[in-house]
Image (spheres, grey):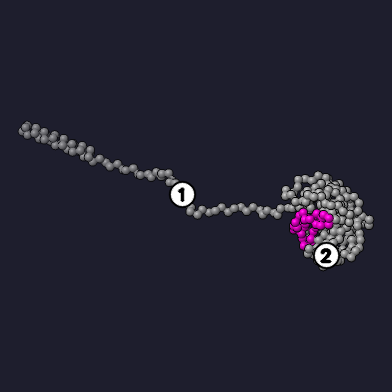
Amino acid sequence: MKDILYKGFHYGLILLMLVSIQACDSFIVITPTLPLPEYTHTPSDTPTPTQTIEWFPPTATPTLLPASKTPTPTMAIGPGERNVVLIDNFDREKAWETYRSDIGSAALGKEELTLAIAAPKGYLTSFRYGPFPANYFLEIIANPSLCRGEDSYGLLLRGIDKFNYYRLGITCNGQVKFEWVKDGKGIPLIEPVSGKTLIIGPPGKNKIAVWAVNKEFRIYINDVYQFSVYGLVQLEGSFGVFARSAGENAVTINYSNLTVYEGLQMPPTPTSIPTPIPSSMPTIRTP
């Protein structure tokens, strides 16, 4: 009986140990499942977008500049300090050459000198009596009251006599020219050019200005520079005016308001193109 109890106890103890081992194994094996951590998405840096190629990029619209104005012509300022040498209102009978002929007449009227041509292709001149300065800046008003086409009028400068002088001519169709009249024959020094600001035809009054200093003339019409003439050989002489008919028609030109100033010194010439001038001195002869 004692052995039986001993064996029973022994088997019970073994059974208890097996249960304990299984329990331990179950504890070890059956491990409670831990909840998985929630996945948090960490945003990466924003990727740089790929640059799109512009095959036809837009062209910038240019900013338009203000339209440039037409260049202002050189004005006839004349000498800086213009001292008046002579004022002639054409009111003195003995101051100008007057006459009447088959060609026409040169006559003084009311503060003006009138050259009237009646004959076809007539040519009239009138010189002022008395001394005239060698260097000067002068202005005179010319009014072609009856004039057309190739008819012309203008100034006679540094006249030695009726056959030798310089002639500034303006045609009634708008051309300006400069000649050296030598022994009665005109030698062109400036080919005819279109007059800037020239008022063409009657009743277009034009203010003609000449700046003469030594061997150079500068020509202005209505206060606008036209051209220069260089290398002049006649350095002094009298002053006059003229009128010419180019055809069968009559011509009438009125001159007024002559003012002469000292010439003084010229500033640099407006153009560097020299004028071809004949080198020989003119032959002086008495008309």
Mark 2 is surrounded, within 10 Å at the Cα level, by few (under 14), some (14 to 19) or many (20 or more) other residues, namely: some
- Name which residue type carries label 1: Gln
- Name which residue type carries label 2: Lys
Part of the protein shown in magenta: 168-197
**Of the two numbered discs 2 and 1 in the rendering, the one whose residue sits closer to the viewer:** 2
Q: Name which of mark 2 and mark 1 comes first in the sequence.
A: 1
Whether 148 is among the magenta residues is no
Most prominent secondary structure in the magenta stretch?
strand
**Residue contact at pointers 2 and 1, CB within 8 angstroms:** no
Element carrying mark 1: loop
* Residue 146 falls left or right of residue 12: right
Q: Which mark is residue 121?
A: 2
Residue in the foreground of this view, choosing between 250 and 201: 250
Residue 165, given in percent of the width and then of the height, sits at: 84, 53
The answer to which quarter of the image holds residue 35 is: top left
Residue under the image location 72 percent in, 48 percent down: 272
Residue under the image location 34 percent in, 42 percent down: 37
Q: Which residue is mark 1?
A: 51
The answer to which quarter of the image holds residue 31 is: top left
Q: Report the quarter where the C terminus lies.
A: bottom right
Residue in the foreground of this view, choosing between 32 and 57: 57
Residue in the foreground of this view, choosing between 27 and 249: 249
Alpha carbons under labels 2 and 1: distance apart: 86 Å
Residue under the image location 66 percent in, 53 percent down: 66
Residue in the foreground of this view, choosing between 186 and 48: 186
Q: Report the quarter where the N terminus lies.
A: top left
Residue 99, given in percent of the width and then of the height, sits at: 91, 61
